[in-house]
Image: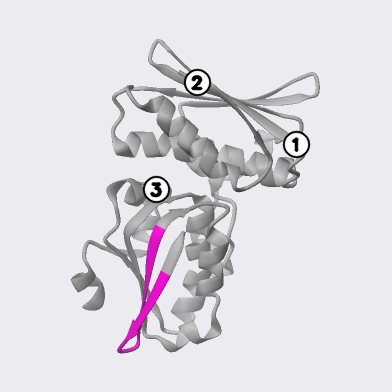
Amino acid sequence: MKNAIRISCNRSNLKVVRDFVSGYLVGYGQNAVQVNQIILAIDEVVANLIIHANGEDANQFLDIKLDVHNKTFTIELRDQGISYSPSTYLEPDLLEHIRTGKKGGVGMTLVNRIMDRVEFSHSGTYNICRLYKTLT
Amino acid sequence: MKITQQTSENTLTLTLDGELDASSSVLLDTELSQPDILNNKKVLIDCQRLNYISSAGLGVFISHLQRFQDAGVKLAFYNMQEKVHNVFEILGLDSLMTIVPSQAEAVAL
């Protein structure tokens, strides 16, 4: 089964990644809610990398690799955009978001609440994000 | 994402068909930003064919909620698939927004 994909940094590729992950997870016994959560977490990170790290520059690319080992689903994302610093993350105050009409700022909250572990690192010129989820 | 509108008795119903992500949510934002949308007493969102929502889609609803409340417009969702409702639950938005099972309950609000 195909376990890796390269996309250019264009929002239209979000759907391509979701379909890729969905296809990969078939056969791992996850229900619709569980599959949707994993797809959502990956979609949120990919959207951040496309829009914020790479400024929607279609000449930039993301490499996404999926793996399941001992029931742990691992997603690795590599790009060469602006690095994300998880230390800047703040838990959102949703009432404040509603009051001020704020649109963004809840994507990483979804990722952190869905995945078991989220790691950001560097290797040479590459940023690497790894997401881990135990499949039940 | 396909959005269709239906208006009757001061109620605007938006039927969402497809996936709301960082790409398609711009279309929804445009619909909800129309000034005359505040002339309605209710804006109902039919989610039966909404197959996916990301933070970008949620953010559009979050960003308009106060504006609707200030204008006395009720915003409510109905016919939501379990996997979509679960995304609202993860953030606790299910307790901050009005989500009802059926169209009949949404109309009766």
Which percent across, then down, holds residue A127?
72, 27
Residue B8 as seen in the image, left or right of residue A86: left
Residue B30, quarter of picture = bottom right
The residue at the point 74 percent across, 34 percent down is: A83
Q: Which residue is mark 3?
A: B87
Residue B97 as seen in the image, left or right of residue B28: left
Which percent across, then down, holds residue B80?
30, 57
**Secondary structure category for the residue under label 2:** loop
Q: Amino acid at mark 3?
A: Val
Residue A135 as seen in the image, left or right of residue A85: left
Q: Which residue is mark 1?
A: A60
**Secondary structure category for the residue under label 3:** helix
* Location of residue A28 with respect to B57 vertically, above or below: above
User: What secondary structure is the magenta-colored segment mainly?
Assistant: strand
Classed neighbour count for the residue bearing mark 3: other residues with Cα under 10 Å, few (<14), some (14–19), many (≥20)? many
**What range of the chain is rendered magenta?**
B4-17
Disc 2: which chain? A
Q: Is residue B13 visible?
A: yes
User: Same chain, marks 2 and 1?
Assistant: yes
- The CA span between labels 2 and 3 is 28 Å
Q: Which residue is mark 2?
A: A2
* Location of residue B72 with respect to A26 vertically, above or below: below
The residue at the point 55 percent across, 84 percent down is: B35
Q: Amino acid at mark 2?
A: Lys
- Observer-side mark, 2 or 3, equals 2
Q: Amino acid at mark 1?
A: Gln
